[in-house]
Image: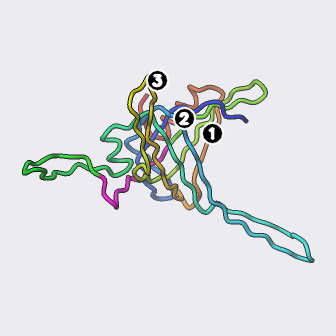
Amino acid sequence: MAKIGLKGFWSGDYAESAGGITYTNGKKVAKAVSLSINRTMNEATMYGDNSIDDSAYAITQMTIEITPTGLSADELKEFIGLSEEEITINGEPETLKATTPDSEGKAKGIGILEEERMSGITKYKATIFANVKFKPSESEEAQTKGENLTFTTPSYTGQCYTALGRYFTFENTFETEEEAITFLEKIFAISP
């Protein structure tokens, strides 16, 4: 199916125990601007009788890059490890937001909603990136106002980890957007 839309980022704190996953503190974090998924593959080919007999591949690493419309200071604390520190500047104590070289966010489950279309039929796919840790944005931009306004929003890269010994995502496709949103709210234990 062709992707024709992306809506929302949902999240919850990730925990794994007794063969299951639990998400707590679930919420819809922000509106979605963009999402990029990057996979590293390991491939092997077996030769026999002077030709290819078999081949196999495995995903060895996966990252996602999300661009939300914006994250609050509290969300940045959880997502990238942004902290508040009291620092003395010019003899006066100031409380400032800070990232450190070892800043790291909490393990999160991240949910997205994609609108897909094929042969005139629209479906709604809810995807859960099961266990992700984000780091501070590698680059940000700002521009002066000119004759034309331009929005710039930072992106955040998250490393995907295994969940229950499996890589990395699970998904479900629905006939309506409302069903997909209800599914995401159920996964992240969000009260409607």
Pick the front one: 83 or 93? 93
143 in relation to 85, above or below: above
Please give left or right for residue 110 compared with residue 39 in the image.
Answer: left
Q: How many marks?
A: 3
Q: Which residue is mark 3?
A: 148
- Give the magenta part as a residue range: 99-110
Q: Which residue is mark 1?
A: 172
Amino acid type at mark 2: Phe
**Which residue sits at x=57%, y=32%?**
180
Q: Position of residue 70 (x, y in %)?
A: 40, 35
Q: Which is more N-terminal, label 1 or label 2?
A: 1
Q: Which residue is mark 2?
A: 183
161 in relation to 148, above or below: below
Q: Which mark is residue 129?
A: none
| Residue 103 among magenta residues | yes
**Which residue sits at x=59%, y=58%?**
166
Q: Which is more N-terminal, label 3 or label 2?
A: 3
Q: Which is more N-terminal, label 3 or label 1?
A: 3
Q: Main secondary structure of the magenta part?
A: loop
Query: Is label 2 in contact with label 1 (beta carbons under 8 Å)?
Result: yes
Q: Position of residue 20 (x, y in %)?
A: 50, 54
Query: Is label 1 in contact with label 3 (beta carbons under 8 Å)?
Result: no
- In the rendered image, the residue lying farthest to the front is 147
Q: Which mark's residue is nearer the viewer, 2 or 3?
A: 3
Report helix, strand or loop for mark 1: strand
- In the rendered image, the residue lying farthest to the right is 49
Viewport quadrant of the C terminus: top left
Q: Position of residue 49 (x, y in %)?
A: 92, 77
Amino acid type at mark 3: Asn
